[in-house]
């Protein structure tokens, strides 16, 4: 059985691009920070990508405006 508490000493870090500080990598057992993460495939999609991305962002912005618990990232 796994503990849901983070191990105090972790050797896996990444550098936060905003602060340049060393940050521990998240654990699979950490609570989610976003309601949904959208992955947009872009290989050979130059004709469909602009409209698909626009529709996706419009929906997510509209939903997050009406439902404050709906958070997203693209």
Image (cartoon, rainbow, N blue to C red):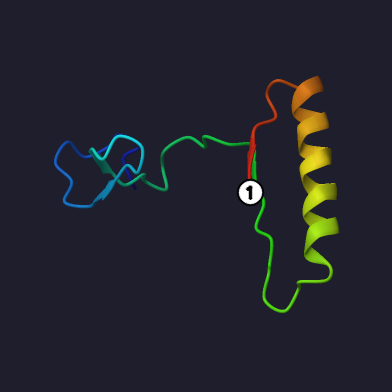
| Image position of 72 (left or right of 52) | left
The answer to whether 48 is drawn above or below residue 72 in the figure is: below
Q: Of residues 27 and 15, which is closer to you in this image?
A: 15
| Image position of 59 (left or right of 23) | right
| Image position of 63 (left or right of 9) | right
| Image position of 33 (left or right of 9) | right
Residue 29, x across and y down, in percent: 41, 42
Residue 22, x across and y down, in percent: 22, 41
Q: Quadrant of residue 58?
A: top right
Residue 50, x across and y down, in percent: 80, 59
Q: Of residues 31 and 13, which is closer to you in this image?
A: 13
The residue sitting at 77% across, 38% down in the picture is 60
Q: Quadrant of residue 69?
A: top right
Residue 33, x across and y down, in percent: 52, 34
List the residue tagged with mark 1. Answer: 74
For disc 1, the neighbor class at 10 Å (few under 14, some 14 to 19, many from 20) is few
The residue sitting at 77% across, 33% down in the picture is 61
The answer to whether 21 is drawn above or below residue 38 in the figure is: above
The residue most toward the bottom is 44
Q: Is disc 1 placed on a helix, strand or loop?
A: loop
The residue sitting at 81% across, 21% down in the picture is 66
The answer to whether 26 is drawn above or below residue 12 in the figure is: above
């Amino acid at each position: 059985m796994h503990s849901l508490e983070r191990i105090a000493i972790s050797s896996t870090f990444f550098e936060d691009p905003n602060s340049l500080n060393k940050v521990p990598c998240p654990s699979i057992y950490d609570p989610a920070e976003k309601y949904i993460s959208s992955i947009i495939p872009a290989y050979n999609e130059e004709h469909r990508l602009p409209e698909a991305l626009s529709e996706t962002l419009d929906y997510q912005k509209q939903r997050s405006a009406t439902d404050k618990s709906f958070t997203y990232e693209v």
